[in-house]
Amino acid sequence: MKSFIILFVCFALLACSDTHENNASNTAASPKKDGRVRSLTKSKASLERFFRPMTVSEGDWLESHPENGETFEEYVDSGPTLPTPERNKIYVQPLGDFTADQIKVVRLTADYLRAFYNLPVVLRDVEPLRDVPSDMQRIRYPDNLQIKTGYFFNLLPSMLPSDAAALICFTNFDLYPEDTWNFVFGQASLENRVGVWSLWRLERDGRKKVGADRLLDRTLKIATHETGHMFSMRHCKKYECLMSGTNSLEETDRRPLDTCPECTMKIAWAMPYQPRERYEKLAEFWRKQKRTSEEKLMHEKMLAVGDVR
């Protein structure tokens, strides 16, 4: 059991580790701390009551990966990688052999990313995996075909459009990064603006399939978290936040579906995006899913934050 936990820590680290590389060709110059930055800073207080301060339990990410965190103001000062007028779209590419339920989750994830980041999101048609070399695949357990992440990183750059801020690939196959590893949830490269994530483990608790809502929530959290890394957002440690690091699916399930006050203002400044408009769009997303509690929460945040000039 101990070796499994140690490996799981490595899996979580790998899933996020490549996302902090700098990519000057996709970096917009950071403006000085103008009135909008000051207004967003003041607006953080209006959202604090919706988030719990971070607490660390045994086995959690921060227990084994101490981090400094990052405030909104530090993010602005860091010269983050941002969308540019030439590269402003998020592309979502399903690769594999998906069930109807899995495709629905991918489609809803594209809709959520659009509302979450205020960027155009292009959902591409499903493509099968073709010509996977024998050294890029293996069988684990009687029925689990795993694909090496290197296969995707060889393939995805050629599929990257010139106007892409990021290309996010979803597959329904389990993933592994190296022959000595058991699995990984996903892997991303900021330098290449591509990432791949698997639904295979997100839809399971052990060998038991999870319900549709839990699969959707996990997928939304993974997709928005890793896309945040592609825009230079670091792990959050101030609050229980969507951008907080996690060591396990149990810890992921504990996280909210939204960013904390610090990280929300990063999105508001970077995209740019009025927080009020963002919450309105997120509330509408949850209304369509008939998730009343999430819709109500986003509506309450919308009323609390108001307009930011």
Image (cartoon, rainbow, N blue to C red):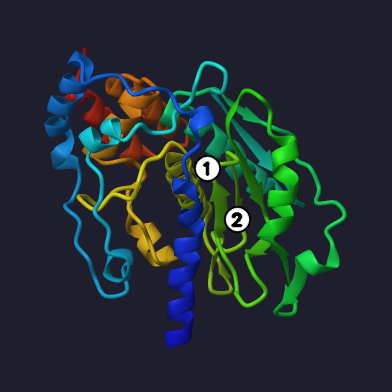
Q: Residue at x 32, y 66 (%)?
A: 65
Q: Residue at x 47, y 45 (%)?
A: 21
Q: Quadrant of residue 175?
A: bottom right
Is 42 on the left or on the right of 233, as rendered? left
Per the image, label 1 sits on a secondary structure element best described as: loop
Quarter of the image that includes the N terminus: bottom left
- Tell me residue 198's x, y (percent): 61, 56
Q: Amino acid at mark 2?
A: Leu
- Of badges 2 and 1, the one in the foreground is 1
Q: Residue at x 40, y 39 (%)?
A: 232
Image position of 174 with respect to 277: above or below? below
Q: Residue at x 19, y 19 (%)?
A: 306
The label number, if any, that marks residue 69 in the structure image: none
Image position of 18 with respect to 265: above or below? below
Distance CA(mark 2)–CA(mark 1): 21 Å
Q: Amino acid at mark 1?
A: Leu
Q: Identify residue for label 2.
A: 199
Image position of 16 with respect to 116: above or below? below
